[in-house]
Image (cartoon, rainbow, N blue to C red):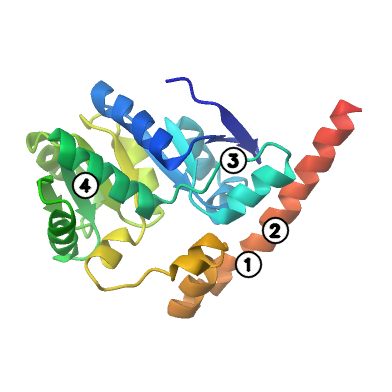
């Protein structure tokens, strides 16, 4: 499918709804490759001063707007995204689709036992879902070959990774060796396993999920300081675009 993208701080964010994103993911599954990134404002701003992260995002096959901050940025830039497509919502949408089409999922990441609990929850929600395998995220880089062999030998059709921001870099480094597309899903396994909670629906819709995360994890406040800087950078980009058009 042809994907229209919006440039936000020069990063291409797919202009897709959640169902359209699932359709795009299914194409990557058919091709047995791909790196999907669900980007929020924090990640996009950080990438401007982090060459490694910048390369990871630009090399991704699909970038969606995980946070409302990215959606608001698209509106400021005059090229609005249709909606937010969060990693957690996309995980559920892919799992639901997989349960209907006999696609196998592999869950990699989080603390020992969490991926198994998350997989069990998904199978309770989607009764016909095939879990090809699970493995924790507490392994060293030199163990990556063994981990990838686990994924490949499972014949999984899609890989969910829950290893923090480092998960994006891990997928980037090893995606050529994997035989299925992969997506980093942050703390989604913890939520599925009942270890963490997601913000109430009204906070998600109003773009205040960041406040819930900050309340639950006060140590995130340093990372949240990038949000106003992101807004300033987007506004500056908008003015630059106006200057070019003149």
Residue with the mark numbered 4:
142
Tell me which numbered mark, 3 or 2, is placed earlier along the sequence.
3
In the foreground, 16 or 42: 16
Tag 2 and tag 1, C-beta contact below 8 Å? yes
Residue with the mark numbered 2:
229
User: Quadrant of residue 240 in the image?
Assistant: top right
Q: Where is residue 233 in the image (x, y as percent from the top left)?
A: 73, 50
Identify the element where label 2 is drawn: helix
Q: Residues within 10 Å of mark 1 (few under 14, many from 20)?
A: few
Q: Residue 225 got which mark?
A: 1
Q: Residues within 10 Å of mark 3 (few under 14, many from 20)?
A: many
Q: Where is residue 95 in the image (x, y as percent from the top left)?
A: 23, 46
Q: Which image quarter is the N terminus in?
A: top left
**Left/right of residue 230 with respect to residue 134 in the rendered view:** right
What residue is shown at x 63% (from left), y 61% (from top)? 226
Q: What whole-number distance in Å separates the C-alpha atoms at marks 1 and 4? A: 34 Å
Tell me which numbered mark, 1 or 3, is placed earlier along the sequence.
3
Tell me which numbered mark, 1 or 4, is placed earlier along the sequence.
4
Mark closer to the observer (3, 2)? 3
Tag 3 and tag 2, C-beta contact below 8 Å? no
**Residue 120 vertical position relative to residue 5 in the rendered view, above or below:** below
Q: What whole-number distance in Å separates the C-alpha atoms at marks 4 and 2? A: 36 Å
Mark closer to the observer (4, 3)? 3
Q: Position of residue 100 (x, y in %)?
A: 17, 38
Tag 1 and tag 4, C-beta contact below 8 Å? no
Identify the element where label 4 is drawn: helix
Residue with the mark numbered 3:
81
Mark closer to the observer (4, 2)? 2
Q: Where is residue 44 in the image (x, y as percent from the top left)?
A: 57, 48
Q: Residues within 10 Å of mark 2 (few under 14, many from 20)?
A: some
């Amino acid at each position: 499918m042809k994907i229209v993208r919006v440039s936000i701080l020069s990063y291409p964010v797919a202009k897709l709804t959640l169902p359209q994103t699932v359709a795009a993911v299914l194409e990557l599954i058919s091709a047995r490759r791909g790196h999907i990134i669900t980007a929020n404002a924090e990640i996009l701003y950080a990438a401007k001063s982090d060459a490694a992260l910048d390369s990871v995002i630009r090399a991704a096959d699909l970038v969606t707007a995980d946070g409302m901050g990215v959606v608001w940025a698209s509106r400021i830039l005059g090229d609005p995204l249709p909606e937010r497509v969060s990693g957690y919502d996309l995980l559920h949408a892919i799992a639901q689709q997989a349960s209907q089409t006999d696609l196998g999922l592999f869950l990699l990441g989080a603390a020992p036992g969490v991926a198994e609990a998350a997989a069990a929850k998904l199978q309770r929600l989607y009764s016909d879902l095939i879990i090809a395998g699970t493995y924790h995220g507490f392994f060293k880089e030199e163990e990556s070959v063994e981990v990838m062999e686990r994924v490949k030998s499972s014949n999984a059709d899609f890989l969910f990774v829950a290893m923090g921001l480092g998960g994006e870099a891990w997928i980037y480094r090893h995606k050529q060796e994997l035989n299925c597309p992969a997506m980093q899903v942050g703390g989604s396994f913890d939520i599925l396993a009942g270890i963490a909670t997601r913000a109430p629906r009204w906070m998600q819709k109003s773009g205040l999920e960041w406040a819930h995360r900050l309340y639950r994890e006060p140590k995130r406040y340093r990372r949240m300081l990038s949000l106003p800087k992101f807004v300033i950078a987007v506004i500056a980009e908008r003015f630059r675009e106006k200057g070019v058009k003149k």
